[in-house]
């Protein structure tokens, strides 16, 4: 068999099971999330592979290059990276993609899916190395970097491939058409339905989740036949550079041009993303990051389909609970994980000033806020444990917001942030959350809590009633966007009010989470990440709409 036929056979069961998982929406993953599943020496081997990359040029054989090397990454944990990457001119990258495109477009959807699954399988085998790369470019703690940057990101990539294959397979490749004509001979045609890729795709990576947020767009475009230019965030190049190198190896071995996937590394402040985004050859753009640049892309990259995930203000409504301790512990972990540097982390916690009914009696607004602060302190009281949960601060703006909260700029502090020392990484910048008390009706307070405050600053918002909280949720999501909404209630009526508000405003809702599932976590093959129905994002990971417009179908018909 030819290499592609071998890959189709090798990965057919995984693809079939992925398609089943999309329909069932239950838990499934082919990629183990436990580090020990990768062998007794897996973590040590990954560390050694990562160490071998430090202080060296990153090799991308056959990649377009302008002759110079660039590198701007600094580890939030304080270690020296000093990795440089081949830089290429925009026109050279796009010319290479255009040359590579015809052979990939001519491949069948099954062949493209199989190649993508082989890429993901090889990335999965190097999950410990990828975890080190993610950790030291994003600030995620190792455990989170391994799971979110490794198997969970790979799940999202596979999910995109499965959706892409399913959408391309909806029409048959060939069909016969016979129309009766009464006494006359019938009209008979043979028809072909050929998928045609839209064109070169651009993936603009983010600093915090380069693989988890990058893989859906990368693999959705590749599986639908489009070349992909990967433009990493300047502070998080290595995870996507490793991904590009693995993809290029697999493509070449399968008989395709490796330049179907290229890396757009740039000099400091070069602005390559804008140049690429406006180029007429770029027909698809996937972006995760600030609202400002996401809006600019949507308004200016008119020649391309633009998929964005931008900033939002995520909200929790606390009405009542039958597990007060579980609620507090769940929220404490959700607010602490990765120092709140997640687009899904709750920011505003809406609490009626009249109090909250719980299994421990009625709790006033002040009591709920104080108890939540104590839950966070209890979770993060030990520095070693705190470092493993919080990770490191990813950029100076996050640190500035934490300092502003500590200085009282956002309101009265219910919980002040503190510095956490890491014995393993003395150079790491680690901060615990700040919890700020604000009033829903005060204009100065609203100016702070109704905009995204990315990082470990959270607002306990006093509202007059649960009804006011639900209405504030609806208004905030509609105007400011959100990736997640969370509610706690024992009332069937409030339950339905929350559901209705989230349907009206277009945000996914989690209700009464008190165990091991948290508001800021979503599972591939089951949960949708975003909806595309509010200002925080114009697309969802992953549904049919995320992949279907990356290709078109051209029909060819002939008399039979």
Image (tube, rainbow, N blue to C red):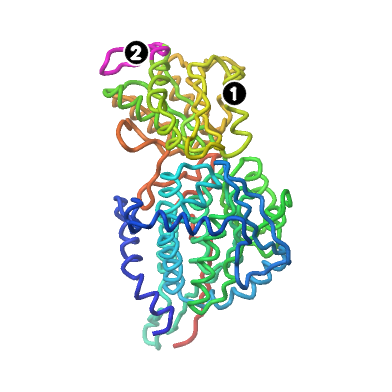
Residue 504 appearing in the image: no
Q: Quadrant of the C terminus?
A: bottom left
Point 58% across, 77% down: residue: 102
Point 46% across, 16% down: residue: 463
Q: Is residue 274 left or right of residue 557?
A: right
Point 34% across, 60% down: residue: 18
Residue 236 appearing in the image: yes
Report which residue position mark 2 lands on. 363
Report which residue position mark 1 lands on. 448
Name the one closer to the observer, 97 or 107.
97
Q: Residue 235's spot in the image, x, y percent?
A: 62, 47
Read off the magenta span.
Answer: 354-367
Q: Is residue 433 above or below residue 290?
A: above
Name the one closer to the observer, 479 or 309.
309
Name the one closer to the observer, 466 or 45.
45
| Magenta-drawn stretch contains 362 | yes
- Of labels 2 and 1, earlier in sequence is 2
């Amino acid at each position: 068999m030819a290499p592609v036929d071998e890959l189709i056979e090798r990965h057919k069961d995984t693809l079939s099971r992925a398609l089943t998982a999309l329909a069932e929406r239950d838990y499934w993953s082919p990629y183990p999330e436990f580090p020990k599943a990768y062998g007794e020496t897996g973590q040590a081997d990954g560390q050694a592979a990562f160490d071998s990359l430090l202080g060296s040029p990153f090799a991308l054989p056959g990649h377009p290059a302008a002759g110079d090397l660039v590198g701007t990454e600094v580890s939030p944990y304080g270690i020296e990276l000093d990795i440089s990457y081949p830089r290429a001119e925009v026109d050279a990258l796009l010319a290479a993609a255009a040359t590579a495109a015809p052979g990939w477009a001519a491949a069948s959807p099954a062949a493209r899916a199989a190649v993508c699954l082989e890429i993901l399988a090889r990335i999965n085998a190097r999950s410990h190395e990828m975890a080190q790369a993610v950790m030291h470019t994003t600030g995620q703690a190792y455990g989170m970097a391994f799971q979110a940057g490794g198997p969970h990101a790979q799940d999202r990539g596979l999910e995109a491939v499965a959706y892409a294959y399913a959408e391309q397979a909806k029409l048959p490749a060939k069909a016969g058409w016979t129309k009766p004509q009464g006494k006359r001979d019938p009209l008979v045609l043979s028809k072909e339905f050929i998928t045609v890729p839209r064109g070169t795709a651009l993936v603009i990576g983010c600093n915090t989740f380069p693989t988890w947020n990058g893989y859906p767009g990368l693999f959705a475009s590749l599986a639908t036949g489009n070349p992909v230019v990967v433009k990493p965030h300047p502070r998080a190049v290595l995870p996507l550079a490793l991904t590009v190198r693995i993809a290029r190896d697999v493509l070449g071995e399968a008989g395709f041009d490796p330049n179907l996937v290229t890396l757009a590394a740039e000099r400091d402040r070069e602005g390559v993303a804008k140049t690429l985004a406006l180029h007429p050859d770029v027909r698809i753009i996937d972006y995760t990051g600030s609202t400002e640049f996401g809006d600019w892309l949507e308004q200016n990259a008119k020649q391309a389909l633009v998929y964005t995930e931008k900033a939002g203000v995520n909200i929790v409504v606390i009405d009542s609970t039958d597990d007060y301790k579980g609620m507090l512990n769940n929220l404490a972990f959700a607010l602490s994980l990765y120092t709140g540097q997640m687009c899904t982390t709750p920011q505003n916690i809406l609490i009626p000033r009249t109090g909250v009914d719980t299994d421990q009696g009625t709790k006033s607004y002040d009591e709920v806020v104080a108890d939540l602060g104590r839950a966070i302190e209890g979770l993060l009281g030990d520095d070693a444990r705190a470092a493993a949960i919080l990770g490191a601060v990813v950029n100076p703006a996050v640190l500035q917001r934490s300092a502003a909260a500590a200085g009282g700029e956002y309101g009265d502090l219910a919980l002040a942030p503190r510095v956490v020392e890491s014995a393993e990484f003395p150079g790491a910048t680690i901060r615990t959350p700040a919890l700020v008390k604000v009033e829903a009706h005060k204009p100065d307070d609203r100016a702070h809590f109704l905009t995204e405050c990315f990082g470990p600053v959270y607002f306990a918002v006093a509202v007059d009633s649960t009804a006011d909280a639900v209405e504030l949720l609806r208004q905030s999501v509609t105007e400011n966007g959100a990736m997640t909404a969370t509610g706690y209630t024992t009332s069937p009526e409030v339950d339905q009010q929350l559901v209705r508000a989230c349907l009206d405003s277009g945000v996914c809702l989690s209700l009464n989470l008190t165990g091991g599932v948290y508001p800021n976590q979503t599972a591939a093959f089951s949960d949708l990440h975003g909806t595309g129905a509010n200002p925080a994002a114009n697309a969802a990971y992953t549904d049919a709409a995320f992949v279907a417009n990356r290709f078109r179908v051209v029909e060819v018909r002939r008399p039979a």
